[in-house]
Amino acid sequence: MLKNIPAILSPDLLYALRAMGHGDEIAIVDANFPAEYLGPEVIRADGSSATDVLNAVLALLPLDDFVDHAAIAMAVVGDPNAKPPIFDEFEQIIAKHEPAAKFSTIERFAFYDRARGASAVVQTGEGRLYGNILLKKGVIRQS
């Protein structure tokens, strides 16, 4: 155990987060997401919700403030303006850790394409539909 690091973050996930550079992306996905054959390393977090993993990751990971949207979810198929309840939770967690960051969505297959280029995919046990989010890593500014 380590101080001030959320226990939900496994050694593999901590390694992936630390290895990421500015502009790299990580995907946190639900239990239905086809993660294993996309290409990036898959880190399992089966006993955790996507929102709990997002909260823990954002306790450590700065979001990119050089882009318009550093937190991007998968839009609802057939109704891109729909807002599943999990989106409200995503937005609250992002606002808690990164108040200036903006949340957006992209079409399902565009999300898959972005996830293919991610540094890692964290497969959670999230059972709620559309519990998928991409995060673009930013920089830590020295004071």
Image (cartoon, rainbow, N blue to C red):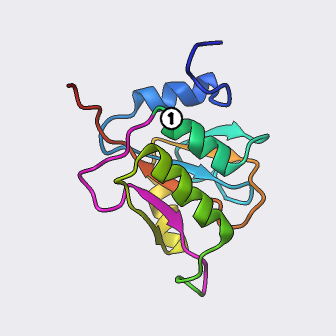
| Main secondary-structure element of the magenta-colored stretch | loop
Residue at 53%, 38% in the rendered image: 57
Q: In the figure, is residue 128 to the left or right of 142? A: right
Residue at 58%, 86% in the rendered image: 79
* Residue 36 visible in the snapshot: no
Q: State whether residue 11 is above or below residue 53.
A: above
Residue at 63%, 42% in the rendered image: 53
Q: Residue furthest left?
A: 143
Q: How many marks?
A: 1
Residue 70: horizontal and vertical position, in percent?
Answer: 38, 55
Residue 92: horizontal and vertical position, in percent?
Answer: 54, 56
Residue 38: horizontal and vertical position, in percent?
Answer: 56, 53
Q: Residue furthest bottom?
A: 78
Residue at 32%, 41% in the rendered image: 138
Q: Quadrant of the C terminus?
A: top left
Q: In the figure, is residue 33 to the left or right of 66? A: right
Q: Residue 63's image quarter?
A: top left
Q: Which residue is mark 1?
A: 59
Mark 1 element type: loop
Q: Residue 11's image quarter?
A: top right
Residue 28: horizontal and vertical position, in percent?
Answer: 58, 49
Q: Quadrant of the N terminus?
A: top right
Magenta part of the protein: which range? 61-78
Which amino acid, by three-letter code, is at mark 1? Ala
**Crowd rating for badge 1 (residues with CA inside 10 Å; few <14, some 14–19, many 20+):** some
Residue 120 within the segment the image draws in magenta: no
Q: State whether residue 136 is above or below residue 9.
A: below
* Residue 81 visible in the snapshot: yes
Task: In this rendered view, identify the residue nearer to me: 32 or 83.
Answer: 83
